Image (cartoon, helix red, strand yellow):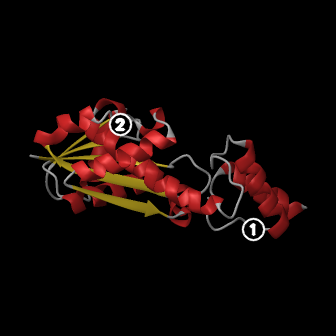
């Protein structure tokens, strides 16, 4: 039986893409995945994630990664449809990999509702959607790592030109960069999500200054 795990990275970030990743593996090899020591990517150091990323890709049968642009994220946030956006792309990842069974980490408070939304985009196979799937199921942990490393590579390329910090709105360095850019150029960088409240506030302040 072919089993798929799906997870995202960068949902809460104020900049860069929202990344959705899926990994596909024969159920007979899931124990090997566990032996690699996969965990929720947030519990691992950057160097450990990179090490596991290579091992995961050499073990799994297939994988698929989708990067959703800040502009697309903004459009969905403005329509209060961020969960729908994530479900849509998770469904696309599952459809691409064509598993018999998929495990998905739910971003919705109601996993059943989220599973139903994903199912709109998937023709075949069973979907199991739960909270904390990235720490409960090795296959989702693997997807979490692939998503995180894929997103980190995008952010690392941006860091070669800009002082970005972590990319999250709680980070002073990140928001200082965003603020300086907006007040200097009277617009946000294309890689920043303008639908996020801290950015909207900065844009409003800039317009008044």
In the rendered structure, the answer to whether residue 87 lies left or right of residue 82 reads left
Q: Which mark is residue 134?
A: 2
Is 206 drawn above or below residue 11 in the view shown? below
* Residue 72 placement (x, y as % from top left): 51, 65
Is 181 drawn above or below residue 100 in the view shown? below
* Residue 103 placement (x, y as % from top left): 25, 42
Is 93 drawn above or below residue 136 in the view shown? below
Query: On the image, which quarter does residue 31 sit in?
Result: top left
Q: Is there CB contact under 8 Å for labels 2 and 1?
A: no
| Residue at left offset 29%, top offset 47% | 56
Quadrant, the C terminus: bottom right
Q: Would you say residue 16 is visible in this rendering?
A: no
| Residue at left offset 32%, top offset 43% | 142
| Residue at left offset 48%, top offset 55% | 151
Q: Tell me how far mark 2 sits from mark 1, CA to CA.
A: 36 Å
Query: On the image, which quarter does residue 65 sit in?
Result: bottom left
Instruction: Give the secondary structure at mark 2.
Output: helix
* Residue 122 placement (x, y as % from top left): 22, 57
Residue farthest to the right? 209
* Callout 1 crowding tier (Cα within 10 Å): few <14, some 14–19, many ≥20: some
* Callout 2 crowding tier (Cα within 10 Å): few <14, some 14–19, many ≥20: many
* Residue 71 placement (x, y as % from top left): 55, 66
In the rendered structure, the answer to whether residue 166 lies left or right of residue 134 reads right
Depth check: give the residue in front, 157 or 47: 47
Instruction: Give the secondary structure at mark 1.
Output: loop
State the residue position of label 1: 187
């Amino acid at each position: 039986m072919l089993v798929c795990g799906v997870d995202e990275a960068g949902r809460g970030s104020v900049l860069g893409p929202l990344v959705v990743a899926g990994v596909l593996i024969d159920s007979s090899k899931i124990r090997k995945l566990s032996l690699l020591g996969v965990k929720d990517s947030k519990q691992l150091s950057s160097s450990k994630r990179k090490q596991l990323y290579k091992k995961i890709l050499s073990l799994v049968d297939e994988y698929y990664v989708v990067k959703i642009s800040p502009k697309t994220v903004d459009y969905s946030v403005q329509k209060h449809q961020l969960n729908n956006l994530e479900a849509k792309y998770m469904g696309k990842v599952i459809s691409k990999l064509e598993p018999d069974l998929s495990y998905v980490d739910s971003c919705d408070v109601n996993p059943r509702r989220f599973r139903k939304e994903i199912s709109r985009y998937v023709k075949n196979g069973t979907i199991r959607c739960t909270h904390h799937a990235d720490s409960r199921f090795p296959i989702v942990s693997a997807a979490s790592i692939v998503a995180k490393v894929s997103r980190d590579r995008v952010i690392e390329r941006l860091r070669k030109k800009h002082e970005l910090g972590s990319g999250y709105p709680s980070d002073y360095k990140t928001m200082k960069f965003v603020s300086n850019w907006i007040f200097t150029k009277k617009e946000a960088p294309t890689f920043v999500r303008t639908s996020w409240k801290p950015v909207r506030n900065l844009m409003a302040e800039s317009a008044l200054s």
